Amino acid sequence: MIGYVFCLRTNIILWYSRKQNSIALSFTEIESIAAIEAIYQSIWLIKILFDLQKEILDPTVILCDNILAITMTKNPVFYTRPKYIELRHHFMKDMISKKEIQLDFINTNDQPIDVLTKAVLAKKFQQFKEFL
């Protein structure tokens, strides 16, 4: 499952959850694909805010719970992968280098999007509900 939530200040303005369309060979690849889809949505949201005459000065922060997926965006060594993943990966690296996107680590246990993509216990559901 892929999911993301976008907040503007303390308000949720967009949320999305769906079954992943492509086949991934590792958790790192799954997290990279999810981060790239979140980047696409962030670009769309930034354009809408620009049309509403709201200037975004800081990079959009995307939280990822896979350290290797984050590391791959900073490491010039590229790992062997299918061409469509390679193009997406370069796009993500470009957005990060332009400081339009900031990819930060979040512990898997603290990842609030899990409430939309996984079965969680009632306690964790309540915790994430309050966080969001």
Image (tube, rainbow, N blue to C red):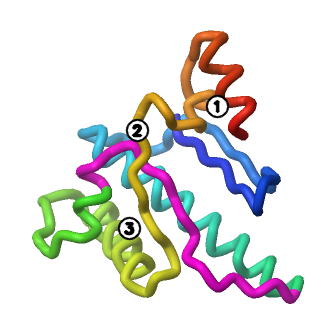
Question: Is 127 included in the stretch rendered in magenta?
Answer: no
Q: Which dot marks residue 116?
A: 1
Q: Which dot marks residue 31?
A: none
Say few, some or many: other residues with alpha carbon within 10 Å of mark 2 (under 14 / 14 to 19 / 20 or more): few
In the rendered image, the quadrant that contains the C terminus is top right
Mark whose residue sits in front, 2 or 3: 2
Q: Which residue is mark 3?
A: 88
Q: Earlier in the sequence, mark 1 or mark 3?
A: 3
In x, y percent, where is residue 19? Answer: 55, 35
Q: CA distance from mark 2 to mark 3?
A: 24 Å
Tell me which amino acid carries mark 3. Answer: Arg
Q: Which residue is mark 2?
A: 107
Q: Is residue 100 above or below residue 42?
A: below
In x, y percent, where is residue 80? Answer: 13, 59
Callout 1–callout 3 Cβ contact below 8 Å: no
What is the magenta range? Answer: 53-69
Q: CA distance from mark 2 to mark 1?
A: 16 Å
